[in-house]
Amino acid sequence: MTKLKSISLMFISFITFGTAVMAQSDNKVTDDELKQFVASVQKIQILNQESQQQMIKIVEDNGLKVERFNEIAEAAQDPNKASDASENEMKKFTDINTSIEKIYASSQKKIEEIIKVEGLSIERYQIIASEIQSKPELQERIQKFINN
């Protein structure tokens, strides 16, 4: 759903959970860790989809269309872009943002729990995510687990 651009951007960080962690070049990722990582990512994706649907509902229940919400959000984030939002729209936008922030915080906690339940620490999850991004051989290994 491309119309969820601003809302979806919020959740992109969930999957990698801040993969700016520098991976050590001698860091070995075991098959068991890859299985745990794949299981975590799959559950996190489901959670993200559910959270996005909740956010869409909040936006629409508060009288804005998702597209309009995204336009206002983009203008609010860009100091060089003037917003054409009315006072009423800005009130709705602020209320919606407050609700979305609560969903985000709740989802963040659930993601941490998913990772731990699957047997990884948050730090190890971040390292594996970083390793996967930089090493094609890990991407191939992980694809095998996804396909099975």
Image: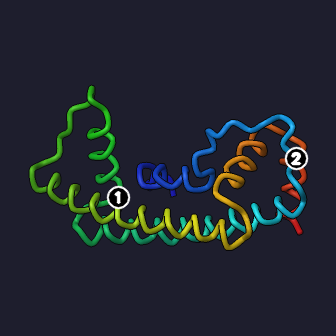
- Taking the spot 71% from the left edge, 43% from the top edge, the residue there is 130
Q: Quadrant of the C terminus?
A: bottom right
* Image coordinates for residue 39, horizontal then vertical, percent: 74, 68
- Taking the spot 71% from the left edge, 48% from the top edge, the residue there is 129
- Taking the spot 59% from the left edge, 52% from the top edge, the residue there is 17
Q: Is residue 45 left or right of residue 110?
A: right
Residue position for label 2? 28
- Taking the spot 75% from the left edge, 61% from the top edge, the residue there is 37
The quarter holding residue 135 reads top right
* Image coordinates for residue 61, horizontal then vertical, percent: 27, 72
Q: Amino acid at mark 1?
A: Val
Circles 2 and 1 in contact, beta carbons < 8 Å = no
- Label for residue 66? 1
Q: Secondary structure at mark 2?
A: loop
- Which of the two discs, 2 and 1, sits closer to the camera? 2
Above or below for 60 versus 137:
below
